[in-house]
Image (cartoon, rainbow, N blue to C red):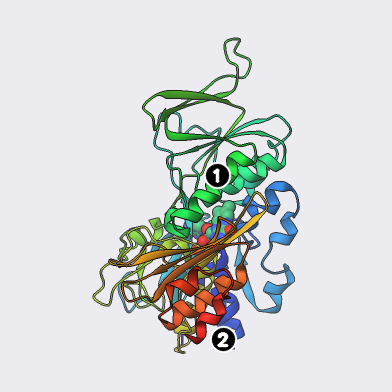
Amino acid sequence: MPASVLVVGGGVAGFAAVRELRRRGYAGELTLVEPQGQPYDRPPLSKEFLTGETDAHRLLFAPPAWFAEHRVRLVARRAERLELDDAAARPRVVLDDGAVLTADAVVLSPGGRPRPLAVPGGDHADVAVLRTRADAERIAARLHLGARVTVIGGGFTGAEVASAARAALAEVTLVSASAAPALTAVGPALAERLHAMHAAHGVDVVEGAVTRIDHHDADAPEADAPHRVHVALVDGTEASVAADLVVAAVGIVPDTALAEAAGLAVDGGILVDEAGRTSHPAVFAAGDAVRRRTAEGAAAAPADPARHWEPAMHGGADVAAALLGEEVPGCGAPWFWSDRHGVHVEGVGSMIPAPGGRIVDRSVRGTVVASFALDAEGRMTGAAAVDDPTAVRAARRIVDRGLLVDPERLADPDVPVRALLRG
Ligand SMILES: Cc1cc2nc3c(=O)[nH]c(=O)nc-3n(C[C@H](O)[C@H](O)[C@H](O)COP(=O)(O)OP(=O)(O)OC[C@H]3O[C@@H](n4cnc5c(N)ncnc54)[C@H](O)[C@@H]3O)c2cc1C
């Protein structure tokens, strides 16, 4: 067991690692390096925090006193470098003030960064992104009645920002490259239904790819808006949208810089096994920054795994167990949730049907309320539902147990999903 553990990154993965180490009775030295100070949660940033229904204090994972009570040293600095001389030496972490910290084991949980919008003008400082509390504060301050807000990207974050902006009575345009952007997460029918909600809630949905963003000095006489977003529409024509605020939500890239520079195996994420072990015996990793490797050490499919809160949290907790030499609990099929325009979406497992598999939809009065992915043998591999967490909870148990299900009963809204647990 390591006498000291240093965790880099205090998002949900890093905080879960620290909390779980203490919960399991770890009595060694514990340090958490987090440049933003007190660790806080991210999902509310695109929801209640944007709409003003929650505040910064309620985002915190734990009250400030928790860290002293649990003897966790919180270092509000950025880790600049991880130094690993050889497998026998203790890892060293160099901070942005030049200080050097050493520990017997290091956990990397630096999360991800917003994927850059790779078009001319896309990297302008005025193009907002949403990853941190400061990002959310910047966006929230500009959501108000009549503000022209263009959101680029129709995935979960983009959809939530568009929804929050409408709630603030802004004039919202959503640019999406697809008519069903959440397809791989919830299946085609629910993805279409969810995407259609934008138009129903007054969002102007533009289908196409952004080609350029022009930025104007607000006082320039020819400028009708500070920003103009140019879009190549799917029908082959072009459009441009005037905006007071542009938010780019086109995905995230795992933050692998520290790991890569230290010589750890990286391929679309820091490569880890099921316990969060990297290619160096004293370094573990968890959360959005990682990607699972196969037993042979190569990156496992998919190339760009979905990155969600609960798998990140379990990843941190798993690392804690592994550090103590205890059995790693794991979390089964990955689960996520999202909210938009007053509805709650949950999903579990993979909604990309396996070869020979299929998607089964469950509808109520012509509206799809849940979808399930089955493999070629009829085993459920994924599920998603709108406003029905109970169904997803039951589906999760079915997926985790690898149960065969009857597609007809699955499609029948009068059969509770939990009834299928009994076969
Ligand atoms: C706006 C938003 C809304 C979301 N909504 C949902 C949702 O509804 N449902 C869902 O399932 N998932 C949601 N997610 C995804 C979920 O929040 C992430 O999967 C989760 O936060 C990943 O946790 P993490 O600890 O790996 O990374 P992060 O939460 O990104 O934390 C990483 C931390 O590491 C720190 N760090 C980075 N580099 C360094 C360094 N060099 N030195 C020290 N510290 C460093 C950062 O400051 C950061 O605090 C959302 C994400 C965002 C951004």
Q: Residue at the far left: name it.
A: 296
Q: Identify the disc placed on residue 378.
A: none
Between 368 and 87, the one lying in front of the other is: 368
Question: Where is 259 relative to 380, above or below?
Answer: above
How busy is the neighbourhood of tag 1: few (under 14 within 10 Å), some, or many (20 plus)? Answer: some
Say which quarter of the image contains residue 202: top right
User: x%, y% of residue 153?
Assistant: 49, 42
In the picture, measured across the screen, residue 301 lies left or right of residue 36, that is left
User: x%, y% of residue 58?
Assistant: 73, 61
Does mark 1 have its CB less than 8 Å from ligand 1?
Answer: no
Say which quarter of the image contains residue 151: top right
Which residue is disc 2 drawn over?
26
In the picture, measured across the screen, residue 92 lies left or right of residue 247, that is left
Residue type pointed to by label 1 = Ala
For the image shown, how many numbered marks are present on the structure? 2
Q: Does residue 135 appear anywhere in the picture?
A: no
Q: Does residue 169 appear anywhere in the picture?
A: yes
Which residue is disc 1 drawn over?
196
Q: Going from the N terminus, do you reach mark 2 or mark 1 first?
A: 2
User: x%, y% of residue 68?
Assistant: 70, 74
Residue type pointed to by label 2 = Tyr
Q: Residue at the far top: name it.
A: 221
Q: Nearer the viewer, mark 2 or mark 1?
A: 1
**Who's the residue at 59% across and 42% down the image?**
198
Between 262 and 57, the one lying in front of the other is: 57
In the picture, measured across the screen, residue 411 lies left or right of residue 354, that is right
